[in-house]
């Protein structure tokens, strides 16, 4: 699988993402600087976490207008696969490649802790190595992860099964009003969403942090192994 990681000023999770991708592909991903205007031949584009452009204006707002973004939009329009994690998810919403927005956490502070995610569907390239409603542990580290959208958009996401992951208890119990389970206050406890064609996925927590048993576990690895199987076979 040929993967590329887009790096903006302030990105700080590109190396973690590169390690995760290399662990399942055996090949180092391409690093793509934000000033580039074309993408190489890729199967997957990743927008990693961090604080692009210092998170000025809004998280991801300036990155959504970076020189590389027209090429990413063309890649998306051509049916390319894109993964956005944390700040990458914020950039995808600001670029209107995914619906909704990410606001300040309901707790009004940065949250760095483990959380549990429930897989809402497993017929996508990103989730095919889980079963539906599998629960996995993954770290979160963000100040603006409160997913919000107008009620029509939320209804559309629910009706078309485009919610990728939800924050839940370790046993899979869902309660969007419980701050111990849904720590940033996201509507519907939404932690990630898909595009209409299911080829773009944005999520706030960091699956790339858990791909090695020596670093605490492999809970996030199925996302990456599933992508390899889907995109390469």
Image (cartoon, rainbow, N blue to C red):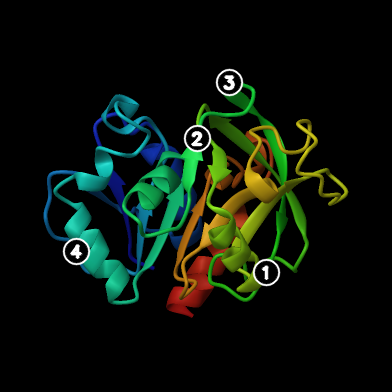
Let me know if residue 33 appears in the view: no
Q: Nearer the viewer, mark 2 or mark 1?
A: 2
The residue singled out by tag 1 in the image is 121
Residue 1 in the image: x percent, y percent?
39, 68
Could you say whether the residue bearing mark 1 is in a helix, strand or loop? loop
Vertical comparison of 113 with 193: above or below: above
Disc 3, disc 1: CB below 8 Å? no
Vertical comparison of 48 with 184: above or below: below
The residue singled out by tag 3 in the image is 108
Identify the mark nearer the N-term, 2 or 1: 2
Identify the mark nearer the N-term, 3 or 4: 4
Taking the image as shown, residue 137 lies to the left or right of residue 52, namely right
Identify the mark nearer the N-term, 3 or 1: 3
Identify the mark nearer the N-term, 2 or 4: 4
Bin the neighbour count of mark 2 within 10 Å (Cα to Cα): few under 14, some 14-19, many 20 and up: some
The residue singled out by tag 2 in the image is 103
The structure residue drawn at horizontal position 62% and vertical position 28%, both measured from the top left corner, is 106
Identify the mark nearer the N-term, 3 or 2: 2
Q: Nearer the viewer, residue 102 or 226?
A: 102
């Amino acid at each position: 699988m040929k993967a590329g990681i887009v790096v903006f000023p302030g990105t700080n999770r590109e190396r973690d993402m590169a390690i995760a991708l290399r662990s399942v592909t055996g090949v180092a991903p391409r690093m793509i600087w934000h000033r580039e205007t074309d993408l190489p031949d890729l199967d997957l584009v990743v927008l990693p976490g961090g604080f692009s452009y210092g998170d000025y204006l809004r998280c991801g707002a300036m990155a959504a207008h970076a020189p590389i973004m027209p090429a990413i939009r063309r890649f998306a329009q051509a049916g390319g696969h894109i993964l956005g994690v944390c700040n990458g998810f914020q950039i995808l919403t600001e670029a209107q490649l995914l619906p909704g927005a990410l606001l300040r956490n309901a707790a009004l502070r940065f949250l760095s802790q483990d959380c549990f995610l429930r897989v809402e569907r497993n017929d996508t390239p990103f989730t095919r190595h889980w079963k539906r409603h599998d629960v996995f542990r993954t770290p979160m580290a963000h100040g603006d992860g409160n997913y919000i959208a107008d009620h029509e958009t939320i209804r559309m996401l629910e009706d078309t099964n485009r919610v990728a992951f939800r924050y839940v208890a370790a046993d899979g119990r869902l309660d969007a009003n419980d701050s111990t389970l849904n720590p940033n206050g996201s509507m519907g406890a939404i932690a990630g969403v898909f595009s209409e064609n299911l080829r773009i996925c944005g999520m706030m927590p960091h699956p790339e942090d858990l791909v090695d048993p020596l670093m605490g576990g492999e809970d996030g690895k199925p996302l990456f192994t599933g992508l390899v199987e889907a995109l390469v076979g």
